[in-house]
Image (cartoon, helix red, strand yellow):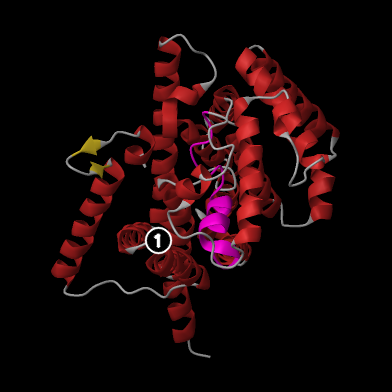
Amino acid sequence: MLGLFTGFQYDIGVVLRPFDVLLGLGGLFLVGRASIRGRIDTFKKPTVYYLFVATYSYRCVNAIFLSGTGTALKETLQVLEFVLLAHLIAVSTRKTEHRRLFFQTLLSGSGLLALFAAGWHVSNGYYAAYKELGDAKYVFSLFALLAFSAYLRDESRYTGVLLPVAVVLVVLSGERKGWVALLGGGGLMYFVYQGGSIRHLLARIFQPRVLVTGATVVAMMVAIGLQFEYVTRQIETTGDVYVLLSNFNLRMDLSAFETSGSNLARLYILLFTVRMALAHPWFGVGTGRWHEALAEVAYSEKSQYMVGAHSEYQRFTVENGLIGLALYVLAWGAAIRDSVRRYQHSEGGSKGGRLEVVGLAFFGALINLFLGGGALNILFMALAVGLLVGLENDLDRKKLLSASSSVPQ
């Protein structure tokens, strides 16, 4: 995770990221572990695992026919990267105590990275607008999500202080995709934590104490955000997106709209996505051919933000057609469904670490709705899938089942 969010790259003829290096070391670890034990760990795989593998395998096949062998090879390496990362996560989270340690480490690591990144940003004269941080700007919302889960389970008296700090950092980052992902992932996590009943949830929310506290917290967050011009502009221009989408048509002229460059870029990309889906509905333009297809349209140079997909769902639609999009949506849907079911069917101590899986599954599905391409997409997928594979092979649950079956009737 640190290798991903720091964003460093090393050029040795090809660009090598710390993410790739860490995965390579992880592969050596698994091979060495298998050699010592004399066997390779085999896991029972849930449906979501096969759906994600099928989704990215389809990208490989699509590339062979529409893009070329070079792109197909690159996509094959990405599939192997995803499978390896998911396997490493599964190996690390098969026991309840190990799962708790995994999330504690993830919370501490993301928190330290978020605070360091914020400190670096402030030392350079910026108190908001963390755009210059690159991939590190997404760690704020991940940190806040994990802090929220720790707060719900009341793991420590310090979580009551940690959570507001994390949320303030998310607000100041100005990353609207981070806001949405945190609200969605945290909201689903809170819903299942309260029993998964809308009636029960509303009864809890409409208590005077909860309403007053919630309103106060929201007011404070907004007040803090409005102290900075960039955050204010991000809040204001969110309404512009709604206005434009409510009047959306394929022939709309965007040049007359006064809004931020990133908003216009997203709308241009939306037009581009719809037009490509109509022109190449089933198989798309070919894996990895997004930039080539975008360069052919007249508005490809309209904005500095027109550098790629603003959504992984858009990328699948354009490059792999409706078939690729359907596989991708099914995979995320299965991840969310499985995570909720596994939390609801767990009992007592076995719930440890399962609540976070619910939040991360929905968090990943939402943030990829606003984030297209790159290693971060793999991280959020592998977290959800690897954790679900680990839960499928829960050693504590297997011991419990084995013990109950051995009790004489």
> Is 90 on the left-hand or right-hand side of 73?
right
The picture quadrant where one finds residue 242 is top right
Judging by the rendered image, the residue that carries numbered circle 1 is: 67
- Residue 202 % position (x, y): 83, 47
Question: Going by the picture, which residue comes out furthest to the top?
Answer: 125
Q: Which residues are magenta?
A: 304-324
What x and y, as percent, mark residue 102? Answer: 40, 49
Q: Looking at the image, which residue is at 65% across and 11% down? A: 227
Q: Residue at x 75, y 44 (%)?
A: 251
Quarter of the image that includes the N terminus = top left
Q: Nearer the viewer, residue 172 or 217?
A: 172
Whether the magenta-drawn stretch holds residue 315 is answered as yes
Q: Residues within 10 Å of mark 1 (few under 14, many from 20)?
A: some
Q: Position of residue 19 (x, y in %)?
A: 30, 45
Image quadrant where residue 92 sits: bottom left
Query: Which sits in the foreground, 44 or 12?
Result: 12
Figure check: 88 above or below 44:
above
User: Where is 99 relative to 270, above or below?
Assistant: below
Task: Check if residue 259 falls in the magenta segment.
Answer: no
Q: Residue at x 52, y 14 (%)?
A: 127
Callout 1, which amino acid?
Ser
Name the foreground residue: 207 vs 60: 60
**Position of residue 273 measured from the top left corner of the image (x, y, whole percent):** 61, 50
| Frontmost residue, 394 versus 349 | 394
- In the rendered image, is residue 217 in sight? no
Q: Is residue 131 visible?
A: yes
* 168, above or below 309, in the image: above
Q: Residue at the spot x=35%, y=62% of the render? A: 68
- The overriding secondary structure of the stretch rendered in magenta is helix
